[in-house]
Amino acid sequence: MSSADGFGRFFLPGPTEVRPEILHAQIGPMVGHRSPATERTVERLQRGLRPLFGTERPVYIAPSSATGFMEAAVRNGVRRRVLCLVNGAFSERFATIARACGREAEELTVAWGEAHDPARVADALAGGDFDAVTVVHCETSTGVLNPVADIARVAHDAGDVAVLVDAVTSVAGMEFHADDWNLDFVLTGSQKALALPPGLALGVAQPSVLERARANPARGLYFDLLAFERNLEKSQTPTTPAMSLLYALAAQLDAIEEETIAGRAERHRAMARTLYAWVEDVRSRDLAIEILAPAGFRSPTVTCLRPPPGWSGSRVQAALAERGFTVAPGYGRLRDEMFRIGHMGDHTVSELETLLAVLEEVLRR
Ligand SMILES: *Cc1c(COP(=O)(O)O)cnc(C)c1O
């Protein structure tokens, strides 16, 4: 059931619902960003963030939405020519950013709702003269999870190719291993699986990317990863940090450490299983709902569903809104055909069950 404070009714796949305790944690004092107090906060954040990303490297923190670090990935990590793996709206955005930053971008596209096949990625890389690949781990527009570790393996087998990964709706919603998976750059944002207010971009670069940045004097200033690296050596940030959001992040990392990363990942898998079982159940009772992503490639954090005939995504959204619940319509070209449920962040199985019970009532009306 939704708690007394009303938490548990907002299921957008970003921004996600933020617990009142986390919102209140933002009420901390403003302190100088070169002060020992800020350095202690940054040190605390590093301790919590590294295991979440699965890295020994420092985790960069910028006052920006996640798209800012997609641009940082390109400016620092792509020399000249990049293969962009596209299977939805956010992976398409990576190609748009690459071109806007003056890089040559070629798209390898599979249908929205499908995952990328590492063998096809290997074929596309062979002889294509690419120095980087972009991939979105969890395509929030479709609910598809791409096999990033396997994609990274074929990319590195193809030569000096940097693997740049948008992990916006996967980090903090599942176990993530940036180092073991050999991902050269990984980014996320605060307002998705971390369940914080929007406004922070977080990222991890391997030395391979820093080397590329060093060789590129036109990498820009705001997202110069060398500046993030240099400042973090002193537990500082290149420019004024979004202090209030850092306080919220520190509070959330306390909560994550208490739940454990494995426990948080299991809670997300349990929510996903609950949703799949509900779909099976209502389908067996003549409600024609379908999950877009194929089994085996489904995200534990977001699910994109085709509603029964006669329903558009916006109509599902509006009907649930009347009952006080928020879900999203499909994204971009899937807006009318689909609707999406974000089951990530601090939601629980029982809150999701409440939503699904109301959804069934609404759809059978
Ligand atoms: C939400 C999202 C983004 C964009 O995040 P902003 O914070 O709005 O810039 C990028 N990639 C994915 C996969 C997302 O879900």
Image (tube, rainbow, N blue to C red):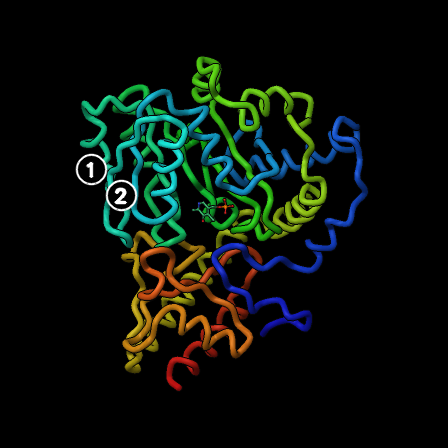
Q: Are marks 2 and 1 in contact (CB under 8 Å)?
A: yes
Q: Does mark 2 have its CB less than 8 Å from ligand 1?
A: no
Rendered view: 307 above or below 260: below
Q: Is mark 2 on a helix, strand or loop?
A: loop
Residue in view at x 29 percent, y 68 percent: 290
The residue identified by callout 1 is 120
Residue 258's disc is none
Residue in view at x 49 percent, y 50 percent: 173
Q: In this view, does 61 lie to the left or right of 84?
A: right
Counting from the top left corner in percent of width and height, residue 237 is at 66, 28
Depth check: give the residue in front, 302 or 90: 90
Q: What residue type is labelled 1?
A: Arg
Residue in view at x 51 percent, y 23 percent: 220
Of the 4 image quadrants, the one containing the N terminus is bottom right
Residue 116's disc is 2
Q: What residue type is labelled 2?
A: His
Counting from the top left corner in percent of width and height, residue 226 is at 55, 20
Depth check: give the residue in front, 195 or 88: 88
Seen as rendered, the residue at the extreme bottom is: 365
Q: What element carries label 1?
A: helix
